[in-house]
Image (cartoon, grey):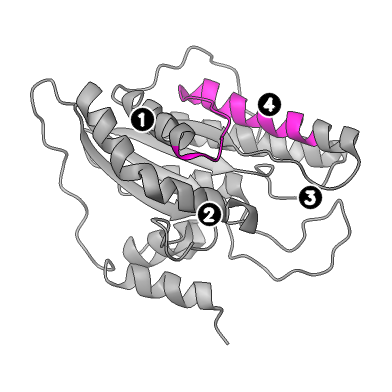
Amino acid sequence: MIPERQVLDVVAVAASAGRERPSPARREIGIPAVDLVVLIDSSEAMKELADTLSKVVGAAIGAAGLKHPVNLRVTYLGIETAFPSTVFMISARGYLTVARRVDEALLTSRPRGPWSGASEGQSAGVEGSAGRVLVDIVAHFDWRSGATRNVLFLGDGPLDGVRSRTPAGQDEDRGAAGRVIEAARQMGARVHMCPSLGRSRGDAATQERRRTGIKADYARVAVETGGQFLVVQDSLGACLTMLESVIGGSTTAPRITTAARMPR
């Protein structure tokens, strides 16, 4: 039986399947063209934030347009599944493989696997990690010619998608951050990173180290791709301010000052 979210996913993107590649962004004097993909982690903990964002996106776009007039195109995607009744009605994989007809063999992410009962420190059956999905979106999204390329990622977990708190797991997360940076630089894209790090169960010191590591990886991706690093606060006012800031900061091509070699 196909999961309910997967059915909604396919139905949502089917209407867009086979459409033509978007035409080049209109070149208006003094009006920059901006493509923005808002990508959210698909964990249940992010559902409330998805709801909040859905309530303020219109106001944020309007407010940003008053301060920074732009030819804006925004696409809302879930990392691995959709969030019904929100603007995130399509998964990244669904958009790329159905609407964009990208060959799945070209994607670095894989479909979400079932929970296998893996112990802490293992992958927990999730193969399509956030870092890999970010790479796929940067590389295969239908960016308009002439528009700046921007991704806003909102997540509550490590970029590698593993539950590991071991040194090996932390190295994997740093490697995932490096791959996102490398892909963004190659495509001339800016990645804005917004961690949502609420309190969770378990040893307080261990949880704090985990949050610190996640924030460091997210900040590194933002800084080294020319994006913004903003810690998510789940309130209408905070989300409105965040979206307005990201849209306003996406009107020019990213400036990269570091030339450090990225790990693979």
Looking at the rendered structure, the kind of residue marked 4 is Ala
Q: Which of marks 2 and 1 precedes in the sequence? A: 2
Q: Are marks 2 and 4 in contact (CB under 8 Å)?
A: no
Name the residue: 80% across, 70% down.
Answer: 116
Mark 4 neighbour class, 10 Å CA radius: few under 14, some 14 to 19, many 20 or more = some
Q: Which of marks 4 and 2 precedes in the sequence? A: 2
- Point out the residue furthest to the bottom here: 1
Where disc 1 sits, the SS reads helix
Q: Which residue is mark 3?
A: 163
> Quick one: 233 or 254, which is closer to the camera?
233
The CA span between labels 1 and 2 is 22 Å
Q: Which residue is mark 2?
A: 79
The residue stretch that appears in magenta: 210-236
Q: Nearer the viewer, mark 1 or mark 3?
A: 1
The CA span between labels 2 and 4 is 20 Å
The CA span between labels 3 and 4 is 17 Å
The CA span between labels 4 and 1 is 24 Å
Q: Are marks 1 and 2 in contact (CB under 8 Å)?
A: no
Q: Which of marks 1 and 4 precedes in the sequence? A: 4
Taking the image as shown, residue 186 lies to the left or right of residue 169, namely left
Looking at the rendered structure, the kind of residue marked 1 is Glu
Name the main secondary structure of what is drawn in magenta.
helix
Q: Which residue is mark 4?
A: 216
Mark 3 neighbour class, 10 Å CA radius: few under 14, some 14 to 19, many 20 or more = some
Q: Which disc, if any, is residue 26?
A: none
Looking at the rendered structure, the kind of residue marked 3 is Arg
Looking at the rendered structure, the kind of residue marked 2 is Ile
Q: Which residue is mark 1?
A: 244
Mark 1 neighbour class, 10 Å CA radius: few under 14, some 14 to 19, many 20 or more = many
Q: Position of residue 153 (x, y in %)?
A: 51, 40
Q: Are marks 1 and 3 in contact (CB under 8 Å)?
A: no
